[in-house]
Image (tube, rainbow, N blue to C red):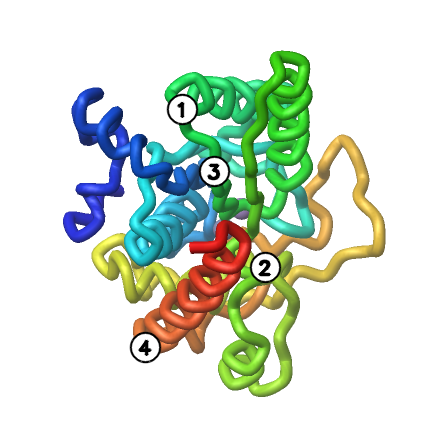
Amino acid sequence: MIEAAYAHRRIDLMSWTTYRDRLAEDPVIFLPVGALEQHGPHLPMGCDAILAEAMAARVADELDGLQLPALRYGYKSQARSGGGQIFPGTTSLDGATLTAMVRDILREVVRHGARRVVIVNGHVENQWFLTEGIDLALRELAHAGTSMKVVRCEYWNYTPQSVLESMFEGAFPGVDLEHAALLETSMMLALHPQLVELAALPEDAPGAFPGHDVYPQDGRGVPASGVLAPARAASAEKGVTLIESTVAAMVKALRCEFVL
Ligand code: ZN
Ligand code: MN
């Protein structure tokens, strides 16, 4: 999604000459990563990428950074965090593909002269493949006698505990089960209400899973709607609080990390 207020930071929307000139200031480059994955009957399937992109855009704006176009596909959905690969529409990459994409993009931005990158992840299942892509890129760079600093983060880890506690009244189900639930629905209502179909909010019970995963995936424990925890208390107001508090914490952490 292109948000007009942040479009001037988007590398894909600028000329190569503008990009070259901006790189001379050694900006932090943001790469949002999401997934194309079912998010219940009420949210668009690009939700994880849309939210990662929105967080990255706001943080980049505060830190005078630049933003790469998001990776809008991610690693395979898992039952306990996204309902699994059993829904039409969920369109996932092999781990090696995602790893290679991250490695290739890092290799390219280093060639451009960038040395500071933040990968903002919006899809639980991506985490270790992003790490692997970073690791392979850094190993290759070390062989070539150069280096860069990469931060990989899941944006939800910055949301203050106090905010979560107030929203869930002490009953926070955990980030994994929050798939297409209160948090994502609220943030989507705040950002893109036209993409949320509130009338389609499901009434089914939350996901109930054993402590293990079974393959081939058979959908056991996954609610038929694909929504893993209750979303009915979602609101745009909560979404604004979530986005603002998360962005503020992320800005603070990255200022410290990059000495900005
Ligand atoms: Zn999601
Ligand atoms: Mn996801």
Is tag 4's residue or tag 3's residue first in the polypeptide sequence?
Answer: 3
| Any part of residue 54 in sight | no
Q: What element carries label 3?
A: strand
Disc 3 crowd rating (10 Å Cα; few below 14, some 14-19, many 20+) is many
Name the N-terminal-most of marks 1 and 4: 1
The amino acid on which the numbered mark 4 sits, given as a three-letter code, is Glu
- Which residue does the image show at 25% across and 57% down from the upper left? 192
Q: Mark 1 points at which residue?
A: 113
- Secondary structure under tag 4 reads helix
Left or right: 259 in relation to 170: left
Which comes sooner in the sequence, label 2 or label 3?
Answer: 3
Q: Nearer the viewer, mark 4 or mark 3?
A: 3
The reply, left or right, for residue 130 in relation to residue 15 is right
**Mark 4 to mark 3 CA distance (whole Å):** 31 Å
Residue under numbered circle 4: 237
Query: Which amino acid type is marked by label 3?
Result: Val
The tag earlier along the polypeptide, 2 or 4, is 2
Q: Mark 2 points at which residue?
A: 228
| Number of callouts | 4
Q: Quick check: 130 left or right of 238?
A: right
